[in-house]
């Protein structure tokens, strides 16, 4: 009886093991089938959309007479290492992006113009002057404002928008501190009883404050009330502004029993008391630093162009965002050698010039070949090989973000510092099915590294996906 039980148990165990093995084999088989099906589905879905790696889903977030903000949304799917939306903020001369906070963190890059940015940190307001080439980070939930301080010149900013902390994935939400009829201040949502008590003001004063603004989120200081006054005031040196504030705000002690004038209320509401202004001035020294790309020596430079990247070791605020930044300048008739980013997805914006971009699938087929021009926005998935080529008669300047704040070490597939150079030997020759001598001649033919010369007339027109314009 015992032997029968033991034999029965043994049979059950064997059957179970066979079943598990079959399930495992079946699972692996289906995994392969699923992968092949995903490749086929992706190919069917996107083969007719040769511009899939060009981001064209632009949404106008806001627009006023003084400026606008639009966002180019990232694509979805598991292929994307991390979703980053690319934003563009344009402000007319002498305009203000009113105080607000966002549900997303920003890393902004000043493309053209000069700006003042105010950021509230630990209940203190710090101001920083920004110029072309500067990077600056604004954390999610931190109140800030931006002012275009340059007369006669538009301010152009490029933004990395990380919506991972947002209320809704992939969207950006503004919460305006200042406002009136348009836009609404977040304060307007509370009932008047709460606000009159919280601010210790009358209901009429409350209505006056919360109903005056109607210019929108970006306002022109030229068109606002008392525009001449504010224009003259803002044009003063900082010390002169402080002295003027003392004259206007610091009334003698014996006058404190009289109601404050509307003029004093206006100054106090905008600039605060002299003590607050002094704290603001002192805090300027401790405000978050900016980082200028144009003052930075390139990581690589030769006769064909230059490139640089900025990570958290260069600019520590990037660590909190998990974002890296890069700048590539290609001279006419040159290219950034075919390469792979093994640690990050890359987002790029063409600042100047023209050229084209090629991206390759993991299976060695051409995914996209697209023309690039100023304003083009593209993305390259992690691990995907790609190349950027400047036109023969024009330079190509690209600024962009990567989805890692760690140092990026791209693997180049051609040039004197390529992985082929490192792998050169009988193993690589066997992989290509050629002799080692022929492989050496092939690898040694290019003596330049990273940024290489490119002559389109020298090469026959390649077969594959046609060029895509954006």
Image (spheres, rainbow, N blue to C red):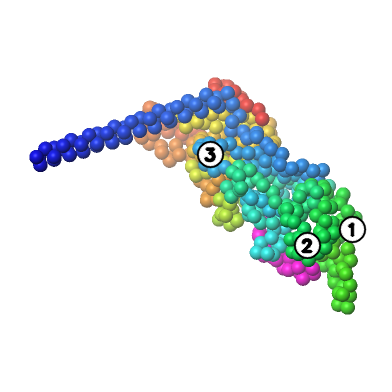
What residue would you read off at disc 1? 229
Span highlighted in magenta in the image: 273-290
- Name the quadrant of the C terminus: top right
Point out which mark residue 41 bears.
none
Q: CA distance from mark 3 to mark 2?
A: 49 Å
Q: Main secondary structure of the magenta part?
A: helix
* Kind of element beneath mark 3: loop
What residue would you read off at disc 3? 80
* Kind of element beneath mark 2: helix
Q: CA distance from mark 1 to mark 2?
A: 29 Å
* Kind of element beneath mark 1: helix
- Image x and y of residue 136, in percent: 66, 53
Query: Quick check: can you spot residue 436?
Result: no
Q: Mark 1 or mark 2, which has the lower sequence index?
A: 2
Instruction: Tell me: 212 left or right of 132.
Output: right
Instruction: Tell me: 35 left or right of 132.
Output: left
Label 2 crowd bin: few (<14), some (14–19), many (20+), radius 10 Å? some
What residue would you read off at disc 2? 196
Q: Please say if the residues under marks 1 and 2 sit with CB atoms less than 8 Å apart.
A: no
């Amino acid at each position: 009886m015992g032997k029968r039980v033991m034999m029965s148990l043994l049979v059950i165990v064997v059957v179970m093991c066979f079943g598990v093995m079959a399930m495992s084999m079946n699972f692996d088989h289906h995994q392969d089938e699923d992968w092949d099906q995903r490749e086929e589905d992706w190919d069917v879905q996107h083969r007719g959309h040769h511009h899939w790696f060009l981001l064209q889903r632009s949404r106008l977030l806001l627009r006023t007479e003084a400026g606008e903000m639009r966002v180019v949304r990232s694509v979805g799917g598991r292929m994307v290492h991390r979703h980053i939306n690319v934003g563009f903020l344009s402000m007319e001369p002498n305009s203000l992006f009113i105080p607000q906070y966002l549900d997303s963190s920003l890393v902004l890059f000043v493309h053209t113009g000069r700006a003042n940015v105010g950021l509230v940190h630990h209940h203190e307001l710090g101001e920083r002057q920004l110029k072309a080439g500067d990077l600056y980070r604004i954390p999610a939930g931190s109140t800030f404002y931006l002012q275009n301080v340059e007369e006669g010149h538009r301010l152009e900013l490029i933004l990395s928008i990380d919506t991972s902390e947002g209320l809704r994935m992939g969207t950006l939400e503004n919460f305006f501190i200042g406002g009136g009829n348009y836009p609404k201040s977040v304060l307007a949502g509370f009932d008047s009883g709460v606000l009159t008590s919280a601010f210790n003001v009358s209901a009429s004063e409350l209505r006056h404050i919360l109903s005056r603004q109607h210019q929108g989120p970006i306002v022109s200081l030229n068109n606002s009330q008392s525009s001449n006054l504010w224009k003259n005031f803002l044009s003063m040196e900082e010390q002169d502004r402080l002295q003027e504030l003392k004259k206007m705000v610091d009334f003698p002690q014996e006058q404190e029993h009289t109601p404050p004038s509307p003029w004093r209320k206006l100054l106090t509401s905008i600039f605060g008391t002299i003590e607050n202004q002094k704290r603001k001035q002192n805090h300027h020294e401790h405000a978050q630093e900016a980082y200028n790309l144009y003052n930075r020596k390139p990581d690589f430079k030769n006769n064909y162009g230059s490139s640089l990247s900025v990570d958290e070791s260069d600019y520590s605020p990037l660590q909190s965002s998990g974002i890296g930044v890069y700048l590539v300048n290609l001279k006419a008739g040159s290219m950034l050698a075919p390469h792979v980013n093994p640690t990050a997805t890359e987002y790029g914006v063409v600042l100047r010039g023209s050229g084209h971009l090629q991206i390759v699938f993991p299976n060695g087929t051409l995914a996209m070949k697209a023309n690039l021009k100023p304003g083009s926005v593209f993305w390259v998935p992690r691990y995907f090989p790609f190349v950027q080529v400047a036109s023969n008669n024009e330079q190509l300047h690209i600024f962009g973000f990567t989805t890692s704040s760690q140092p990026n070490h791209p693997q180049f597939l051609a040039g004197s510092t390529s992985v082929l150079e490192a792998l050169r030997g009988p193993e690589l020759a066997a992989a290509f099915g050629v002799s080692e001598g022929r492989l050496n001649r092939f690898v040694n033919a290019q003596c330049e590294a990273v940024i290489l010369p490119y002559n389109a007339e020298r090469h026959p027109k390649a077969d594959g996906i046609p060029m895509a314009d954006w």
